[in-house]
Amino acid sequence: MAIEGGLPLRGEAEIHGAKNAVLPVLSAALLCPRSVIRNCPMLSDVRAACRILERLGCSVTSGEESLSVDASCARGCGVPASLAGEMRSSIIFLGALLARFGKAQIALPGGCRLGPRPIDLHISGLRRMGARIIEQEDGLICSADKGLKGADISLAYPSVGATENLLIAASLAKGETILRGAAQEPEIDGLIDFLNLAGARLCREGSMIRAEGVRELHDVDYTIIPDRIEAATYLSAAAATGGEITLKRVCTSHLASILPVFREMGCRVEDSGEKVSLSAPRRLLPVSFVSTSPYPGFPTDALAPIMAASLLANGESRFEEGVFESRYLHVEQFRDMGADVRLDGKRAYVKGKPCLYASRLHCTDLRGGAALAVAALAAQGVSLLDELQHIHRGYEDMPAMLRRLGGRVWTLSSSLVRKDISPERGERAAITGFGLAPVPRIQGVL
Protein backbone atom coordinates (compact mmCIF):
# COMPACT_ATOMS: atom_id res chain seq x y z
CA MET A 1 0.00 0.00 0.00
CA ALA A 2 1.33 3.44 -0.95
CA ILE A 3 0.28 6.39 1.21
CA GLU A 4 0.96 9.99 0.31
CA GLY A 5 1.10 11.96 3.53
CA GLY A 6 0.50 15.56 4.46
CA LEU A 7 -3.14 15.79 3.36
CA PRO A 8 -5.83 16.43 6.01
CA LEU A 9 -8.56 13.80 6.09
CA ARG A 10 -12.02 15.28 5.53
CA GLY A 11 -15.47 13.86 4.95
CA GLU A 12 -17.88 11.24 6.24
CA ALA A 13 -17.72 7.46 6.47
CA GLU A 14 -19.59 4.59 8.08
CA ILE A 15 -17.94 2.27 10.58
CA HIS A 16 -18.12 -1.48 9.98
CA GLY A 17 -19.21 -4.20 12.37
CA ALA A 18 -16.76 -5.05 15.14
CA LYS A 19 -14.12 -7.70 14.49
CA ASN A 20 -13.94 -8.54 18.17
CA ALA A 21 -17.72 -8.99 18.30
CA VAL A 22 -18.34 -11.07 15.19
CA LEU A 23 -15.75 -13.80 15.87
CA PRO A 24 -17.32 -15.14 19.11
CA VAL A 25 -20.76 -14.82 17.50
CA LEU A 26 -19.61 -17.02 14.62
CA SER A 27 -18.45 -19.60 17.13
CA ALA A 28 -21.76 -19.44 19.01
CA ALA A 29 -23.57 -19.91 15.69
CA LEU A 30 -22.42 -23.53 15.86
CA LEU A 31 -25.05 -24.02 18.60
CA CYS A 32 -27.96 -22.65 16.52
CA PRO A 33 -29.68 -24.42 13.63
CA ARG A 34 -29.48 -21.30 11.45
CA SER A 35 -28.05 -17.85 12.09
CA VAL A 36 -28.18 -14.65 10.08
CA ILE A 37 -25.41 -12.27 11.12
CA ARG A 38 -25.82 -8.72 9.82
CA ASN A 39 -23.37 -5.80 9.68
CA CYS A 40 -20.67 -8.43 9.34
CA PRO A 41 -17.25 -7.05 8.39
CA MET A 42 -15.51 -8.86 5.54
CA LEU A 43 -12.16 -9.53 7.20
CA SER A 44 -9.55 -12.26 6.81
CA ASP A 45 -10.24 -13.39 10.38
CA VAL A 46 -13.94 -13.68 9.54
CA ARG A 47 -13.12 -15.75 6.46
CA ALA A 48 -10.90 -17.96 8.62
CA ALA A 49 -13.75 -18.48 11.11
CA CYS A 50 -16.06 -19.38 8.23
CA ARG A 51 -13.57 -21.96 6.96
CA ILE A 52 -13.55 -23.52 10.44
CA LEU A 53 -17.35 -23.66 10.44
CA GLU A 54 -17.35 -25.28 7.00
CA ARG A 55 -14.75 -27.79 8.17
CA LEU A 56 -17.15 -28.66 11.01
CA GLY A 57 -19.93 -29.37 8.50
CA CYS A 58 -21.76 -26.02 8.50
CA SER A 59 -22.94 -24.21 5.41
CA VAL A 60 -21.92 -20.55 5.23
CA THR A 61 -23.25 -18.12 2.63
CA SER A 62 -22.53 -14.42 2.34
CA GLY A 63 -24.86 -11.60 1.40
CA GLU A 64 -24.64 -7.83 1.47
CA GLU A 65 -22.90 -7.09 4.78
CA SER A 66 -24.25 -10.36 6.17
CA LEU A 67 -23.47 -14.01 6.69
CA SER A 68 -25.88 -16.92 6.97
CA VAL A 69 -24.71 -19.97 8.89
CA ASP A 70 -26.60 -23.28 8.67
CA ALA A 71 -25.23 -25.47 11.45
CA SER A 72 -28.08 -27.98 11.43
CA CYS A 73 -25.90 -30.67 9.85
CA ALA A 74 -22.64 -29.88 11.65
CA ARG A 75 -20.80 -33.05 12.56
CA GLY A 76 -17.08 -32.40 12.98
CA CYS A 77 -15.40 -31.67 16.28
CA GLY A 78 -11.81 -30.94 15.24
CA VAL A 79 -10.03 -27.71 14.25
CA PRO A 80 -6.70 -28.56 12.60
CA ALA A 81 -3.53 -26.49 12.85
CA SER A 82 -3.92 -25.31 9.25
CA LEU A 83 -7.08 -23.42 10.30
CA ALA A 84 -6.43 -22.67 13.97
CA GLY A 85 -3.11 -21.07 13.08
CA GLU A 86 -4.81 -18.37 11.02
CA MET A 87 -6.27 -16.46 13.97
CA ARG A 88 -6.02 -16.19 17.73
CA SER A 89 -9.78 -16.43 18.22
CA SER A 90 -9.93 -20.00 16.95
CA ILE A 91 -9.76 -21.10 20.60
CA ILE A 92 -13.29 -19.68 21.02
CA PHE A 93 -14.61 -22.74 19.16
CA LEU A 94 -13.56 -24.94 22.08
CA GLY A 95 -16.56 -24.12 24.28
CA ALA A 96 -19.01 -24.40 21.39
CA LEU A 97 -17.66 -27.81 20.32
CA LEU A 98 -17.86 -29.21 23.86
CA ALA A 99 -21.36 -27.82 24.33
CA ARG A 100 -22.69 -29.30 21.10
CA PHE A 101 -20.75 -32.53 20.64
CA GLY A 102 -19.29 -33.28 24.06
CA LYS A 103 -15.82 -33.47 22.55
CA ALA A 104 -13.30 -31.31 20.76
CA GLN A 105 -9.84 -31.52 19.30
CA ILE A 106 -8.30 -28.15 18.56
CA ALA A 107 -4.82 -27.02 17.59
CA LEU A 108 -3.23 -24.10 19.40
CA PRO A 109 -4.27 -20.76 17.90
CA GLY A 110 -2.27 -18.23 15.91
CA GLY A 111 -2.65 -14.46 15.54
CA CYS A 112 -0.51 -11.40 16.29
CA ARG A 113 2.85 -11.63 18.08
CA LEU A 114 1.90 -9.57 21.13
CA GLY A 115 3.53 -11.72 23.77
CA PRO A 116 2.11 -14.60 25.83
CA ARG A 117 -1.67 -14.93 25.82
CA PRO A 118 -2.22 -18.11 27.83
CA ILE A 119 -5.46 -20.05 27.61
CA ASP A 120 -5.27 -21.42 31.14
CA LEU A 121 -8.42 -19.53 32.19
CA HIS A 122 -10.34 -21.15 29.31
CA ILE A 123 -9.12 -24.59 30.33
CA SER A 124 -9.63 -24.27 34.08
CA GLY A 125 -13.15 -22.87 33.61
CA LEU A 126 -14.21 -25.66 31.26
CA ARG A 127 -12.76 -28.23 33.62
CA ARG A 128 -14.93 -26.76 36.36
CA MET A 129 -17.87 -27.47 34.06
CA GLY A 130 -16.93 -31.14 33.80
CA ALA A 131 -14.72 -31.18 30.71
CA ARG A 132 -11.75 -33.52 30.56
CA ILE A 133 -8.91 -31.71 28.79
CA ILE A 134 -5.59 -33.22 27.78
CA GLU A 135 -2.98 -30.59 26.96
CA GLN A 136 -0.53 -31.58 24.27
CA GLU A 137 2.36 -29.65 22.78
CA ASP A 138 0.43 -28.78 19.63
CA GLY A 139 -3.16 -28.66 20.85
CA LEU A 140 -5.96 -29.83 23.12
CA ILE A 141 -7.99 -33.04 23.23
CA CYS A 142 -11.21 -32.49 25.18
CA SER A 143 -14.28 -34.48 26.15
CA ALA A 144 -17.39 -34.12 28.25
CA ASP A 145 -19.03 -37.54 27.91
CA LYS A 146 -21.84 -36.72 30.34
CA GLY A 147 -22.28 -33.21 29.03
CA LEU A 148 -21.20 -29.92 30.56
CA LYS A 149 -22.66 -28.88 33.89
CA GLY A 150 -23.15 -25.52 35.49
CA ALA A 151 -20.47 -24.30 37.86
CA ASP A 152 -19.41 -21.33 39.97
CA ILE A 153 -16.32 -19.97 38.23
CA SER A 154 -14.12 -17.04 39.26
CA LEU A 155 -11.71 -15.58 36.72
CA ALA A 156 -8.43 -14.33 38.17
CA TYR A 157 -8.28 -11.82 35.28
CA PRO A 158 -11.19 -10.47 33.18
CA SER A 159 -10.09 -12.32 30.05
CA VAL A 160 -12.29 -11.50 27.08
CA GLY A 161 -11.62 -14.81 25.33
CA ALA A 162 -12.18 -16.94 28.43
CA THR A 163 -15.41 -15.07 29.22
CA GLU A 164 -16.70 -15.68 25.69
CA ASN A 165 -15.72 -19.34 25.67
CA LEU A 166 -17.32 -20.06 29.04
CA LEU A 167 -20.55 -18.20 28.24
CA ILE A 168 -20.97 -20.11 24.99
CA ALA A 169 -20.38 -23.40 26.81
CA ALA A 170 -22.67 -22.42 29.70
CA SER A 171 -25.58 -21.73 27.35
CA LEU A 172 -26.22 -25.47 26.91
CA ALA A 173 -24.72 -26.72 30.18
CA LYS A 174 -26.96 -28.47 32.72
CA GLY A 175 -27.91 -26.11 35.53
CA GLU A 176 -26.70 -22.65 36.41
CA THR A 177 -23.26 -21.23 35.73
CA ILE A 178 -22.07 -18.18 37.64
CA LEU A 179 -19.08 -16.46 36.07
CA ARG A 180 -17.38 -14.00 38.43
CA GLY A 181 -14.77 -11.47 37.37
CA ALA A 182 -16.04 -11.64 33.80
CA ALA A 183 -14.87 -9.23 31.11
CA GLN A 184 -17.19 -6.25 30.60
CA GLU A 185 -16.30 -5.25 27.04
CA PRO A 186 -19.19 -4.27 24.73
CA GLU A 187 -18.31 -7.26 22.57
CA ILE A 188 -19.17 -9.54 25.50
CA ASP A 189 -22.58 -7.91 25.82
CA GLY A 190 -23.01 -8.39 22.07
CA LEU A 191 -22.38 -12.12 22.48
CA ILE A 192 -24.86 -12.24 25.37
CA ASP A 193 -27.47 -10.53 23.19
CA PHE A 194 -26.88 -13.01 20.36
CA LEU A 195 -27.19 -16.03 22.65
CA ASN A 196 -30.30 -14.66 24.38
CA LEU A 197 -31.96 -13.96 21.02
CA ALA A 198 -31.31 -17.63 20.21
CA GLY A 199 -33.02 -18.78 23.41
CA ALA A 200 -30.20 -18.78 25.97
CA ARG A 201 -30.72 -17.40 29.47
CA LEU A 202 -27.81 -15.13 30.32
CA CYS A 203 -27.90 -12.14 32.63
CA ARG A 204 -25.12 -9.71 33.51
CA GLU A 205 -24.81 -8.22 36.99
CA GLY A 206 -21.75 -6.00 36.69
CA SER A 207 -18.68 -8.22 36.50
CA MET A 208 -20.78 -11.31 37.28
CA ILE A 209 -22.76 -13.16 34.62
CA ARG A 210 -25.37 -15.82 35.33
CA ALA A 211 -26.24 -18.44 32.74
CA GLU A 212 -29.08 -20.89 33.14
CA GLY A 213 -28.43 -23.70 30.67
CA VAL A 214 -31.12 -24.62 28.15
CA ARG A 215 -31.55 -27.81 26.13
CA GLU A 216 -31.17 -26.18 22.73
CA LEU A 217 -30.96 -22.88 20.89
CA HIS A 218 -33.11 -21.83 17.95
CA ASP A 219 -32.69 -19.79 14.75
CA VAL A 220 -31.47 -16.24 15.25
CA ASP A 221 -31.13 -13.00 13.28
CA TYR A 222 -28.58 -10.66 14.85
CA THR A 223 -26.77 -7.42 13.97
CA ILE A 224 -23.11 -6.98 14.98
CA ILE A 225 -22.26 -3.88 17.03
CA PRO A 226 -20.04 -1.15 15.47
CA ASP A 227 -16.28 -1.47 15.73
CA ARG A 228 -15.06 0.98 18.37
CA ILE A 229 -11.40 0.29 17.51
CA GLU A 230 -11.92 1.01 13.82
CA ALA A 231 -13.57 4.28 14.85
CA ALA A 232 -10.64 5.14 17.14
CA THR A 233 -8.18 4.42 14.32
CA TYR A 234 -9.81 6.76 11.80
CA LEU A 235 -10.27 9.44 14.46
CA SER A 236 -6.53 9.12 15.13
CA ALA A 237 -5.82 9.53 11.42
CA ALA A 238 -7.93 12.68 11.28
CA ALA A 239 -6.22 14.06 14.38
CA ALA A 240 -2.74 13.29 13.03
CA THR A 241 -3.42 15.01 9.70
CA GLY A 242 -5.20 18.07 11.09
CA GLY A 243 -8.41 16.87 9.48
CA GLU A 244 -12.13 17.08 10.09
CA ILE A 245 -14.25 13.93 9.76
CA THR A 246 -17.60 12.52 10.78
CA LEU A 247 -18.03 8.82 11.46
CA LYS A 248 -21.51 7.35 11.27
CA ARG A 249 -22.92 4.04 12.46
CA VAL A 250 -20.93 4.09 15.69
CA CYS A 251 -21.92 3.57 19.31
CA THR A 252 -20.45 6.59 21.07
CA SER A 253 -20.97 5.11 24.54
CA HIS A 254 -18.40 2.45 23.62
CA LEU A 255 -15.89 5.26 22.99
CA ALA A 256 -16.27 6.78 26.46
CA SER A 257 -12.62 6.18 27.43
CA ILE A 258 -11.25 7.18 24.02
CA LEU A 259 -12.92 10.47 23.08
CA PRO A 260 -11.57 12.39 26.12
CA VAL A 261 -8.03 11.66 24.90
CA PHE A 262 -8.74 13.41 21.59
CA ARG A 263 -10.23 16.35 23.46
CA GLU A 264 -7.08 16.54 25.60
CA MET A 265 -5.09 16.70 22.36
CA GLY A 266 -6.98 19.86 21.41
CA CYS A 267 -9.52 18.29 19.03
CA ARG A 268 -13.11 19.42 18.95
CA VAL A 269 -15.20 16.27 19.37
CA GLU A 270 -18.97 16.09 19.07
CA ASP A 271 -20.77 12.82 19.68
CA SER A 272 -24.43 11.93 19.59
CA GLY A 273 -25.68 8.37 19.71
CA GLU A 274 -24.62 6.85 16.40
CA LYS A 275 -22.36 9.63 15.09
CA VAL A 276 -19.09 11.25 16.14
CA SER A 277 -17.32 14.23 14.56
CA LEU A 278 -13.73 15.33 15.12
CA SER A 279 -12.02 18.55 14.06
CA ALA A 280 -8.28 18.71 14.75
CA PRO A 281 -6.17 21.81 15.43
CA ARG A 282 -3.16 22.72 13.31
CA ARG A 283 -0.93 21.03 15.85
CA LEU A 284 -2.02 18.61 18.53
CA LEU A 285 -1.42 18.97 22.24
CA PRO A 286 0.38 16.15 24.07
CA VAL A 287 -1.39 13.43 26.04
CA SER A 288 -0.56 13.64 29.74
CA PHE A 289 -0.90 9.89 30.39
CA VAL A 290 -2.79 7.00 28.84
CA SER A 291 -2.72 3.53 30.42
CA THR A 292 -4.51 0.56 28.89
CA SER A 293 -6.68 -1.72 30.97
CA PRO A 294 -9.75 -3.95 30.58
CA TYR A 295 -13.05 -2.24 29.78
CA PRO A 296 -14.24 0.31 30.82
CA GLY A 297 -10.59 1.38 30.82
CA PHE A 298 -8.69 2.58 27.77
CA PRO A 299 -8.54 -0.29 25.22
CA THR A 300 -5.17 -1.77 24.38
CA ASP A 301 -6.18 -2.02 20.71
CA ALA A 302 -6.51 1.78 20.48
CA LEU A 303 -3.11 2.56 22.00
CA ALA A 304 -0.93 2.29 18.88
CA PRO A 305 -3.10 4.46 16.55
CA ILE A 306 -3.40 7.24 19.14
CA MET A 307 0.32 7.01 19.82
CA ALA A 308 0.85 7.59 16.08
CA ALA A 309 -1.13 10.83 16.29
CA SER A 310 0.91 11.96 19.32
CA LEU A 311 4.13 11.78 17.26
CA LEU A 312 3.21 15.24 15.95
CA ALA A 313 2.01 16.79 19.21
CA ASN A 314 3.60 19.92 20.65
CA GLY A 315 5.12 18.34 23.76
CA GLU A 316 5.68 14.97 25.42
CA SER A 317 2.99 12.29 25.64
CA ARG A 318 3.18 9.31 27.98
CA PHE A 319 1.67 5.87 27.44
CA GLU A 320 1.57 2.66 29.45
CA GLU A 321 0.59 -0.77 28.12
CA GLY A 322 -1.10 -2.79 30.83
CA VAL A 323 -2.43 -5.76 28.84
CA PHE A 324 0.13 -7.18 26.36
CA GLU A 325 3.88 -7.47 26.72
CA SER A 326 4.79 -6.70 23.10
CA ARG A 327 2.45 -3.90 22.08
CA TYR A 328 5.33 -1.65 20.97
CA LEU A 329 6.60 -3.65 17.98
CA HIS A 330 5.86 -0.71 15.67
CA VAL A 331 7.93 1.86 17.60
CA GLU A 332 11.22 1.26 15.78
CA GLN A 333 9.52 2.14 12.50
CA PHE A 334 8.13 5.32 14.06
CA ARG A 335 11.76 6.24 14.72
CA ASP A 336 12.63 5.52 11.08
CA MET A 337 10.09 8.24 10.21
CA GLY A 338 11.86 10.75 12.44
CA ALA A 339 9.77 10.27 15.58
CA ASP A 340 11.23 10.63 19.06
CA VAL A 341 9.96 7.67 21.11
CA ARG A 342 11.64 6.25 24.19
CA LEU A 343 10.59 2.92 25.72
CA ASP A 344 10.98 2.02 29.37
CA GLY A 345 9.43 -1.36 30.06
CA LYS A 346 5.67 -1.01 29.73
CA ARG A 347 5.88 2.75 29.25
CA ALA A 348 6.48 4.82 26.12
CA TYR A 349 7.47 8.49 26.08
CA VAL A 350 6.77 10.39 22.86
CA LYS A 351 8.28 13.82 22.22
CA GLY A 352 6.26 15.31 19.41
CA LYS A 353 8.01 16.58 16.28
CA PRO A 354 6.79 19.23 13.83
CA CYS A 355 6.86 16.69 11.00
CA LEU A 356 7.43 13.04 10.10
CA TYR A 357 9.10 11.65 6.99
CA ALA A 358 7.97 8.95 4.60
CA SER A 359 9.54 5.52 4.95
CA ARG A 360 9.36 1.90 3.84
CA LEU A 361 7.18 0.32 6.52
CA HIS A 362 6.30 -3.26 7.51
CA CYS A 363 3.23 -4.27 9.51
CA THR A 364 4.24 -6.39 12.49
CA ASP A 365 0.76 -6.87 13.94
CA LEU A 366 -2.81 -5.70 13.40
CA ARG A 367 -2.97 -2.50 15.47
CA GLY A 368 0.69 -1.67 14.97
CA GLY A 369 0.11 -1.82 11.23
CA ALA A 370 -2.86 0.53 11.55
CA ALA A 371 -0.68 2.90 13.57
CA LEU A 372 1.94 2.93 10.82
CA ALA A 373 -0.77 3.83 8.32
CA VAL A 374 -1.83 6.72 10.56
CA ALA A 375 1.75 7.96 10.79
CA ALA A 376 2.23 7.64 7.02
CA LEU A 377 -0.86 9.78 6.41
CA ALA A 378 0.76 12.57 8.41
CA ALA A 379 4.30 12.20 7.03
CA GLN A 380 5.95 14.19 4.25
CA GLY A 381 6.20 12.15 1.06
CA VAL A 382 4.99 8.74 -0.05
CA SER A 383 5.37 5.79 2.32
CA LEU A 384 5.16 2.14 1.35
CA LEU A 385 3.44 -0.19 3.79
CA ASP A 386 3.66 -3.95 3.27
CA GLU A 387 2.72 -7.14 5.13
CA LEU A 388 -0.87 -5.92 4.87
CA GLN A 389 -2.29 -9.29 5.85
CA HIS A 390 -2.13 -8.06 9.45
CA ILE A 391 -4.32 -5.04 8.67
CA HIS A 392 -6.75 -7.17 6.66
CA ARG A 393 -7.44 -9.17 9.82
CA GLY A 394 -9.21 -6.24 11.46
CA TYR A 395 -10.01 -3.51 8.90
CA GLU A 396 -12.32 -3.97 5.95
CA ASP A 397 -10.66 -2.36 2.91
CA MET A 398 -8.71 0.32 4.75
CA PRO A 399 -7.40 1.88 1.49
CA ALA A 400 -10.96 2.49 0.24
CA MET A 401 -12.00 3.89 3.62
CA LEU A 402 -9.09 6.33 3.65
CA ARG A 403 -9.77 7.39 0.07
CA ARG A 404 -13.37 8.06 1.04
CA LEU A 405 -12.03 10.48 3.65
CA GLY A 406 -9.78 12.24 1.13
CA GLY A 407 -6.55 10.31 1.64
CA ARG A 408 -4.25 9.53 -1.30
CA VAL A 409 -3.80 5.79 -0.88
CA TRP A 410 -3.07 3.09 -3.44
CA THR A 411 -2.99 -0.67 -3.18
CA LEU A 412 0.06 -1.94 -5.04
CA SER A 413 0.70 -5.34 -6.55
CA SER A 414 4.08 -6.90 -5.94
CA SER A 415 5.03 -6.18 -9.56
CA LEU A 416 4.77 -2.45 -8.95
CA VAL A 417 7.16 -2.22 -6.00
CA ARG A 418 10.80 -3.19 -6.18
CA LYS A 419 11.78 -5.69 -3.52
CA ASP A 420 15.49 -4.84 -3.50
CA ILE A 421 15.20 -1.36 -2.03
CA SER A 422 18.08 -0.63 0.30
CA PRO A 423 17.41 2.22 2.74
CA GLU A 424 21.12 2.32 3.53
CA ARG A 425 21.94 3.15 -0.12
CA GLY A 426 19.16 5.73 -0.29
CA GLU A 427 17.40 3.97 -3.16
CA ARG A 428 13.98 5.03 -4.30
CA ALA A 429 10.88 2.83 -4.33
CA ALA A 430 9.66 2.15 -7.85
CA ILE A 431 5.98 3.05 -7.91
CA THR A 432 4.44 3.13 -11.37
CA GLY A 433 1.06 3.65 -12.91
CA PHE A 434 -0.42 6.07 -10.39
CA GLY A 435 0.82 9.46 -11.55
CA LEU A 436 2.40 10.25 -8.20
CA ALA A 437 4.37 13.44 -8.14
CA PRO A 438 8.06 12.89 -7.42
CA VAL A 439 8.97 13.27 -3.79
CA PRO A 440 12.40 14.18 -2.46
CA ARG A 441 14.72 11.64 -0.93
CA ILE A 442 13.57 11.46 2.69
CA GLN A 443 15.41 9.63 5.44
CA GLY A 444 17.29 7.75 2.74
CA VAL A 445 14.26 5.59 1.94
CA LEU A 446 12.19 7.02 -0.88
Image: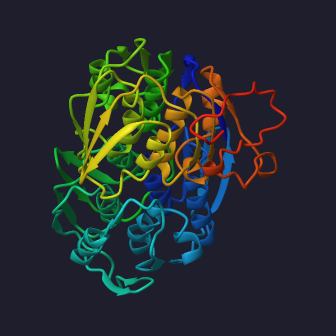
Compared to residue 69, the image places residue 3 above or below, namely: above
Residue for point 77% across, 42% down: 430
Q: Position of residue 239 (x, y in %)?
A: 43, 22
Q: Where's the C terminus, which quadrant? A: top right
Instruction: Let me know if residue 18 appears in the view.
Output: no
Question: Which is more toward the observer, 94 or 296?
Answer: 296
Question: Which is more toward the observer, 435 or 444?
Answer: 444
Compared to residue 41, the image places residue 54 above or below, namely: below
The quarter of the picture where residue 80 lies is bottom right
Q: Position of residue 197 (x, y in %)?
A: 41, 46
Q: Residue furthest right?
A: 433
Q: Position of residue 367 (x, y in %)?
A: 45, 46
Picture colour scheme: rainbow
Q: Where's the N terminus, which quadrant? A: top right
How many numbered marks are there? 0
Q: Position of residue 217 (x, y in %)?
A: 43, 58
Instruction: Let me know if residue 315 appears in the view.
Output: yes
Question: Which is more toward the observer, 262 or 222?
Answer: 262
The quarter of the picture where residue 432 lies is top right
Q: Residue furthest front?
A: 425
Residue for point 69% across, 28% down: 439
The quarter of the picture where residue 410 lies is top right
Compared to residue 405, the image places residue 141 above or below, namely: below
